[in-house]
Each structure stands twice: as structure tokens, then as C-alpha cells.
Amino acid sequence: MLTFAEKLAIIESFPQLQRKDVSLGRVNFHFEESVYDRKVVVQHLHPNGNGFVYAGHLSPSMTDKKGMVNIREYSEEELRTVVEDSIAYLSHFEEAEEMVDEFADLEGVWIGPEKQELTLAQEDLLWNIYAGVNLEECFESPIEAERYLLEEGFHKKKG
């Protein structure tokens, strides 16, 4: 396991990131040029070696509900890769456009735990969730939309 100082040195080697000290000796790193609302790439890097990196580019099964991965046990190569990928993901809407085809099967009706129905629709670069004709939620990424639906107990309607 890398030490706090080693992780800090690796993350600080990315000039695109801005360090923000937070409580309890923890450190966040922001990517101010993000084309999305999300700016935090590294969250709560702690002196004990624990910390999180935003990984919206990964499937929801590989991240927590906020799209973060725990980097406690990451090697130098793994840490560099996940930070690079996070910055790349947050840098380009074009990547979101490429994902549209890959995630087209997410569109349609989703059924909730109490048989309620929500509709996920890709519109331009946004992924919108509707309850009937009312807009319920709006996401910039199909991964975020899917994560939301799964967290709320919904599953894709078959057929």
C-alpha cells in the first residue's frame, strides 16, 4: 500500500488538479475545467492512506453510489490510471456522445420495487428520467442515470 505522502505526490503530479485541504488532515483535488457539474476528482485523501477517486467512466458495479472508488490499496500505476481516466472523462462531452450508442439499451421503461414506472430517455447529450410526463431527474452520463435507477431499486422492463 502506498503511503499518504506517496499518494499525495502522485496526485499532485497532475497539473490540471487543484488541491483543497479539508477537515481532519484530508485533502481533495478539484478539476476546475470539468465539462460536467462534478469537479472533485480526489475526495478525502486521508493521512491513513484511505481516499476516493471519481470513476464515472466505470460501471456502477465497480463504484459506490457517488461514482467513487476507494484507493486505499491501489498501486502507483492503478492510482495514476484512475486519476488520468477520471480527468479524461470529465474533460470531454465527445466521450459522452460515444457512450450514447453503447448505453442505448438503457433507454425505456424501468420498474420500481412497488411497480411504479420511470422512463429513461436520451435527449441530446442528457439522460432524462420521467415519471409520466414529468421530468424526475436529469443526468449528463448514462452511467449516472443507471446508477440512480439501480440505487432506487428499479430494473429495466423486459420486452
Image: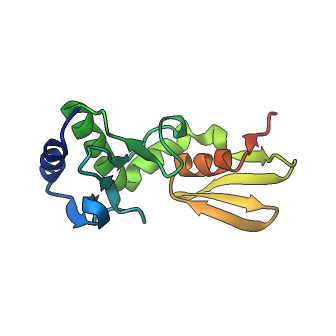
Q: Residue 128's x, y, as percent?
A: 64, 59
Quadrant position of residue 20: bottom left
- Rendered view: 134 above or below 102: below
Count numbered badges in the picture.
Answer: 0
Q: Is residue 63 toward the left or the right of residue 24 in the image?
A: right
Q: Is residue 155 visible?
A: yes
Q: Is residue 30 visible?
A: no
User: What colour scheme governs how the chains and residues are painted in the rendered image of this protein?
Assistant: rainbow
Q: Is residue 97 toward the left or the right of residue 92 in the image?
A: right
If the image is split into quadrants, where does the N terminus sit?
top left
Front one among 111 and 98: 111
Q: Residue 84's x, y, as percent?
A: 25, 44
Q: Residue at left 29%, top 51%? A: 87
Front one among 25 and 130: 25
Q: Residue 75's x, y, as percent?
A: 23, 31
Quadrant position of residue 43: bottom left
Q: Residue 32's x, y, as percent?
A: 28, 66
- Rendered view: 73 above or below 113: above
If the image is split into quadrants, where does the C terminus sit?
top right
Q: Residue at left 20%, top 36%? A: 2
Quadrant position of residue 80: top left
Q: Is residue 149 toward the left or the right of residue 102 in the image?
A: right
Q: Residue at left 47%, top 41%? A: 63
